[in-house]
Amino acid sequence: MMQDFPKLLPPEAKVGFTCFDFRQLCFAPCKNNLTDAAAKSSEGLEPDSASTAEHNSYFVQCRYLSTVGVDVETFSVAPEFAGIKVAPHPHVALMPHFAVTRGELRERFLAGKCRVAAGATLVLDGDIHVEHLDLEGTLIVRAVPGAKVLVKRLTVRNAGWRFEPLTGKAPEYLAIRGYRVKRLGQKVLYYPNPGEYVVEE
């Protein structure tokens, strides 16, 4: 295993390590079934389940947004599915065509004010810059290569995507998570053609 690798090295080998200030940045495995994960969650341990792996990804994206000045709100109580507590952050997916590094992310969010409410869902994919955004609900912005989008001022209010606990039988890809996503409302801005676009509404 990876932690055993240094033991294979000769005594003169230099071995170092890197510390991160939060575990989810470098280690959020999906390795335990619902029963085992729920038991770990009840003991205050990391469940390492499908649901926590997914929500830890959202958590990391939210941390990135916070570092560039976005106001990211969270639930006061962590949501729980099948006895497993997950990160209480908004569901944020920043695609590689939007930003990969923190420097790129800083360039994407300009000097305006941005807010993402607790329970919101945000997907950004493409050459998009954001000045002012107030999001309660779900917003998806996608731009094809060659399309440049400036979100100058946008307020979004809709019912959003609700993560609901499962009841009864469900397909395996849902059953391993313990919830399904119900899409009650969303705003989608899709730019399929190259060009420059400004969003102000």
Image (spheres, helix red, strand yellow):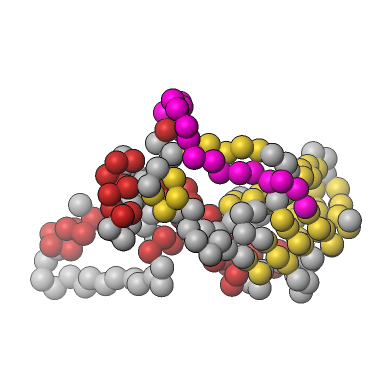
The residue positioned farthest toward the left in the image shown? 11
The answer to whether residue 191 is above or below residue 169 is below
Q: Percent position (x, y) of residue 58?
A: 53, 55
158 sits left or right of 18 in the view: right
Residue at point 27% right, 58% down? 43
Residue 165 lies within the magenta run = yes
Give coordinates of residue 186: x percent, y percent: 73, 43
Tell me where residue 177 appears, x and y as whole percent.
43, 40
x then y, percent, for residue 192: 79, 39
Q: Which of 92 and 98 is in front in this view?
A: 92
Residue 1 visible in the displayed image: yes
Q: What stretch is highlighted in magenta?
A: 157-174
Kindly identify the residue that appears in the image at 35 percent across and 72 percent down.
19
Q: Quadrant of residue 118?
A: bottom right
Q: Does the magenta stretch include residue 190?
A: no
Kindly tell me whether residue 142 is visible in this rendering. Answer: no
Residue at 64% x, 44% y is 161
